[in-house]
Image (cartoon, helix red, strand yellow):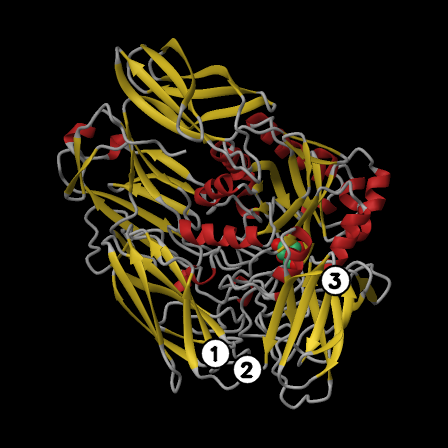
Amino acid sequence: MRKIFFLAYLTMLTIFGYSTVQAQDINFNESWKFYNAEAKGAEQVTFNDNNWRELNLPHDWAIEGPFDIKYNARAGGLPFHGTGWYRKHFKMNADAKGKVVRMEFEGAMYDGHVWVNGEFIGSRPYGYIGFEFDISKYLKYDGSDNVVAVRLRPQDLSSRWYPGAGLYRSVWLKIDNPIHVGQWGTYITTPTVTKDLAVVQNETVVVNKSKNKVKVNIKQAYFSPQGKLVMSVDEDTNIEANSSYTSELFCNIENPERWDTETPNLYSVTTTITQNGNVVDVYKTKIGLRSISYTSEGFFLNGKKVRFNGVCLHHDNGALGSAVYRRADERKLQIMKSMGVNAIRTSHNPPSRELLELCDELGLMVQDEAFDVWKMEKVPNGYNVFFDEWGERDLKDMIKRDRNHPSIVMWSIGNEIIEQKDAKNGWRVAKKLNAYCKEMDPTRPTSAGFNHSPAPYDNNMAQQVDIAGMNYKPLGYSEIHKKYPQLPLCGTETSSCTSSRGVYHLPIEKYQTHKSLHVTSYDLIGPVWAYPPDIEFHYQEQNPFIMGEFIWTGFDYLGEPTPYGGRDNSTNGYWNDDWPSRSSYFGAVDLCGFPKDRFYLYQSQWTSERMIHLLPHWNWKGMEGKDIPVHCYTNCDEAELFVNGKSMGKRVKGKDLTEIKVVFNNYESNTFQSKYRLSWNVPYKAGNIKVVGYKDDKVVQEEQIFTAGKPIKVSLSVDRKEIHANGEDLAYVTIRIEDKNGNLCPEATNLVNFTVKGAGKLIAVDNGDQTSVESFQGNERKAFSGMCLAVLKSSKIAGEIKLIAKSKSLKSDLIIVKTK
Ligand code: GAL
């Protein structure tokens, strides 16, 4: 956790021309210079960067586009590779001399090299891990200019998805006394947590960078979720010159307010280091008191069996690219929670700090995953190139960085690692990586996602981790369990069903690809290893020892437009045959965050509050009298469909089955009788369809879809009417094209134009169409299936942001967002 303001030393420090109270950690995101190409000598102080673009971090240069077929569609069709340089000028006050000054990068995509005042400081290839350097000795403290220069070199064919490019996470300047808590310096665990008692163990590394042996007091104070001091322990100790000391203290907290998915209570711990009566460092850590355990029969949180209703998520936030915005991650997780999700798999790399903090706060369990590859490549310039040199360090750093998060319930050492095939050595590498995890954190189980079966179980690789992750093998659950009854199993990647929001192709067919480059939303289509969610629900039910599932994926993401652009999910070369298809179809939610139908299928299975959802839309001009399959996703007992007021009959959930077409690896039948969806075939007639949901014979839910008339107006709504005036908060505006009665025009593609005034700006637009090559950063967007999205960012001045949306021959609309 980030350190708090440093109250004992309220000295003034001049950074970049203005004075600020000396904080331990100074956010270093503002006023960078950027150049998107090789620049000879750019590490030198005297280099002239006057003509470079000025910007603030976090920044992803690739999301600026343009989309082009010359870039790899499997990685988003965006220019993420090449060289990018960042420079920042800053001044240090004389007061900082003699202190320890570190620069921390929370992530630099990709292969970052850093210079301070012309001196090479170090490098870090893996773009997903944070790193810091002690730069004290390279700085000038006399008020003259200091320059940090960063060179990034993301390679083509280095990722199977869109990685983004740039300083896409925060940068910090950390100024400390020579005696301070080290990087990621606290490690706080809870060896026992019951309803009555939590035993809290705290290991804190205190660094003494001074030339003298020092005597200090180390105090750990624990505050309840309400901020009340509940316990405090301390010790006096000596620390040798130029060395560090690990303080080990424990305490008992009675009647703990436990962390779990319903009540994600967080305690805070303040570590205070005092020397001769002076406070020399204060460091804060957030923790949650909870117990986890697992057996081959399931996973337990605070002693209760929980199933993972999980989603895999990539790190990008759609139109914002990979640049980290706390609000974008928060919204993403809130949407997932509303689908019934209780767990996230950070496929396939260490996520942002913000994402983990939010999972702590929102009560989402996390599988924190380190790698998509080890030594054997999936793409030629991938992490495989760095694995030998950096694998151990990156894995250990991920755990060191993340191990205080109560949300994290397991570590993953890798996804679908090619070494599964290497019967001789695969298990040995897994064994080593597993041991690194245990060395860093023996309190959590380890896992890995295996897509082969039975090879990794038979060749001793799966046995190296605590929980074997089975990817896309619902038919194999019982067989593997029978053969290896002691091995805990989890569906770490499931379904991989694809769809385009609001698109329905009739008649329902199980096709591989469609000429529209979209995929029908009847939730049936996927690549050869994929299957509809219904199949996974069924096999999970049949095999209750499986810990649950992590669907592929919660949200659509940039890149990997399977089933287009190649039917495999590796990127050995360019796969642009189906251009402009350029982003994933796998999400239950589209790239804008708009739910697809599949969202409701999961909601019907994972939530208990009554819900009902109907598909498709009811605009089928030309199909009059022809049968339209109507599907309903609900957790009600029964549902009754009405077409233009006439009942088409009731269907009973769990009893009335829907036959769906299913073709995937090793599945012998061509159909599946699904009890998870209700259906009717009804002749089309314009008007409306309505579904009524019953519970114990009482009407509890209703949904109605009208045949929309012609587009008449643009209609805006916003996720939050008031946001923070902090220069980084976001408001997400949904734009719908509606008819005169306010019905969504489900096929509208009208171009919408945006004007923004006041205390913020428009930073992104999107419509969720996986084939659109319109810029994410323009001030206009075509609607897709009747909808599009505009993302507003606040400035640092409080006021109002006004967004006006116009579209030719439609009535326009505006929305006002307050910033405080
Ligand atoms: C898996 C892989 C994921 C993604 C998915 C698509 O095999 O682990 O990263 O490619 O397939 O179905």
- The spot of residue 448 in percent (x, y) is 66, 42
* Horizontal relation, residue 322 to residue 300: left or right: left
Of badges 1 and 3, the one in the foreground is 3
Quadrant of residue 576 in the image?
bottom right
User: Which residue is at the far front?
Assistant: 698
Q: In this view, does 365 lie above or below 377?
A: above
| Badge 3 density bin: few <14, some 14–19, many ≥20, Cα 10 Å | many
Amino acid type assigned to the residue bearing label 1 in the image: Glu
Given residues 640 and 813, the one toward you in this image is: 640
Q: Are marks 1 and 2 in contact (CB under 8 Å)?
A: yes
- The spot of residue 75 in percent (x, y) is 52, 62
Amino acid type assigned to the residue bearing label 3 in the image: Glu
Gap between marks 1 and 2, in whole Å? 8 Å
Q: Is mark 3 on a helix, strand or loop?
A: strand
Q: What element carries label 2?
A: loop
Residue 425 in sight? no
Q: Mark 3 points at which residue?
A: 638
- The spot of residue 639 in percent (x, y) is 72, 65
